[in-house]
Image (spheres, rainbow, N blue to C red):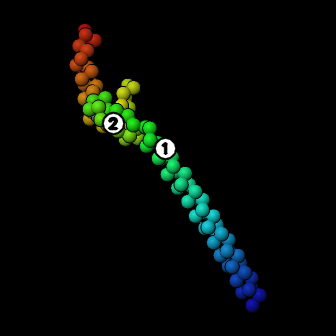
Amino acid sequence: MNLLIIRLIIFAVLFFAGLKLYRMYREWKLDREELLESDDARQEGGQMVRCSWCKVHVPESDALRDQGEWFCSSAHLDRYIQEQQEERPEEKE
Ligand SMILES: [Zn+2]
């Protein structure tokens, strides 16, 4: 019978410890989500870049960067580089 009581006490302690940890985790997670949301809001405020090919403004996180220029897609990056090569034939000679 003694062993059963000890087991019950251990279960109770584990249960309350788990509950406390779960509550701490939830609070920590909520704090973290709030921080992330405010970070996102700050980033969306200023970080817009312009595609060098089509002149459309896109968020920096969606844009591609090459040779100091920003592009909305890899297709426009390719076309921009192609056009630059066509504009400078003297370099080939
Ligand atoms: Zn573009």
Q: Amino acid at mark 1?
A: Arg
Q: Earlier in the sequence, mark 1 or mark 2?
A: 1
Can you name the residue that lies furthest to the front here? 45
Q: Would you say residue 63 is visible in this rendering?
A: yes
Relative to 47, say whether 15 is above or below.
below
Residue reaching furthest to the bottom:
1
Q: Residues within 10 Å of mark 2 (few under 14, many from 20)?
A: some
Which residue occupies 31% across, 29% down?
Answer: 52
The yes-or-no answer for disc 2 within 8 Å of ligand 1 is no
Above or below for 87 versus 11: above
How many residues crowd around disc 1 within 10 Å: few (fewer than 14), some, or many (20 or more)?
A: few
Quarter of the rendering occupied by the N terminus:
bottom right
Give me the disc on residue 57: 2
Which quadrant does the C terminus fall into? top left
In screen coordinates, is 83 left or right of 39? left
Residue nearer the viewer, 3 or 51: 51
Q: Secondary structure at mark 2?
A: strand
On the rendered structure, is 36 left or right of 28?
A: left
Tell me whether the residue at label 1 lies in contact with that at label 2, contact meaning CB atoms closer than 8 angstroms.
Answer: no
Question: Depth check: 24 or 81 in front?
Answer: 24
Total marks shown come to 2
Instruction: Answer with the quadrant where ligand 1 appears in the image.
Output: top left
The CB of the residue at mark 1 lies under 8 Å from ligand 1: no
Q: Position of residue 50 (x, y in %)?
A: 34, 32
Residue 29 pos. (x, y %)? 56, 59
Q: 79 left or right of 43?
A: left
| Horizontal and vertical percent position of residue 32 | 56, 55
What residue lies at 67% left-to-right and 79% top-to-bottom? 11
Q: Amino acid at mark 2?
A: His
Q: Badge 1 is on which residue?
A: 42
The residue located at (33%, 36%) in the rendering is 57
